[in-house]
Image (cartoon, rainbow, N blue to C red):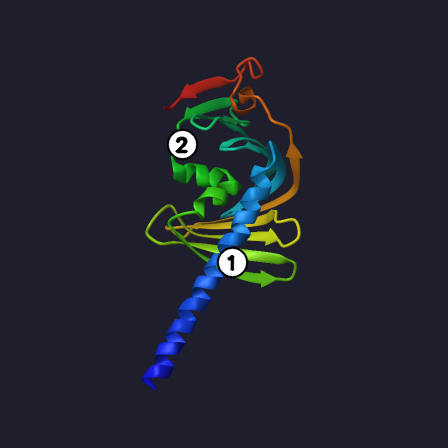
Amino acid sequence: MKRLYFFSVILLLAATSLCAQTAKSVLDKTASVLSSYPSCSAAFTATMGQGTTSGNITLQGRKFYVSGNEALVWFDGQTQWMLLRSTNEVNVTTPSAQELQRMNPYTFLNLYKSGYDLALKTVGSNHIVTLTAQKRQGIKTMEVTINKSSHLPSRVVMTTQKGSKSTIDISQIKKGKKLPDSAFRFSQKDHPKASVVDLR
């Protein structure tokens, strides 16, 4: 009986390890595909609580530009500029890792590499990878839906430690050319009437 129990535990551990490795390989492939693009753009719809916003995002490495129906956001890898359409005010900040996670649906491309346990399931034509934080941090869980053929993500669901949940649906992912750094920085010339508030 003890021997049977021992082998059962070994098989369970092996299966868990294999699942985690497979989940990682799915994310590795997605990261490889997206990082092969000089830049990429996508349409998104984000639902957070009772609110919904939509727009387009352009990414190049850690840099991104978001054109949403409520705001424009530029991030050059260090500084973030957020122009609120309703007030024409630009807030300049140095965002924390947690703030970037909420802003950029592609955060999982780096997040999964450490500090998270991975689990994989397959539903129809999609892989669904669940990332669960190994210790307390901003994002408690993240569920990423990835098409098995294209290896591209179509949905990211994030839950914070406080229990708030956001769902980001991604579509129309397109490969783009390499963009200049200025594409990820606010330009006063392009928005001459905007007032800038530096919160750094």
**Residue closer to the observer: 123 or 17:** 17
Helix or strand or loop: what does disc 1 sit on?
A: helix
**Position of 99 relative to 1 (above/below):** above
The residue that label 2 is drawn on is 95
Give percent across and percent down for residue 19: 48, 62
> Residue 146: percent from the left, percent from the top?
59, 52
Q: Residue at x 58, y 62 (%)?
A: 122
Residue contact at pointers 1 and 2, CB within 8 angstroms: no
The image quadrant that residue 44 belongs to is: top right
32 vs 199: above or below: below
Mark 2, Cα crowd under 10 Å, few <14 / some 14-19 / many 20+, is: some
Query: Residue 69's x, y, as percent?
Result: 59, 33
Residue in the image at 57% along x and 47% along y = 30
* Residue 117 vertical placement versus 10 (above, below): above
> Earlier along the polypeptide chain: callout 1 or callout 2?
1
Which secondary structure, mark 2? Answer: loop
List the residue tagged with mark 1. Answer: 22
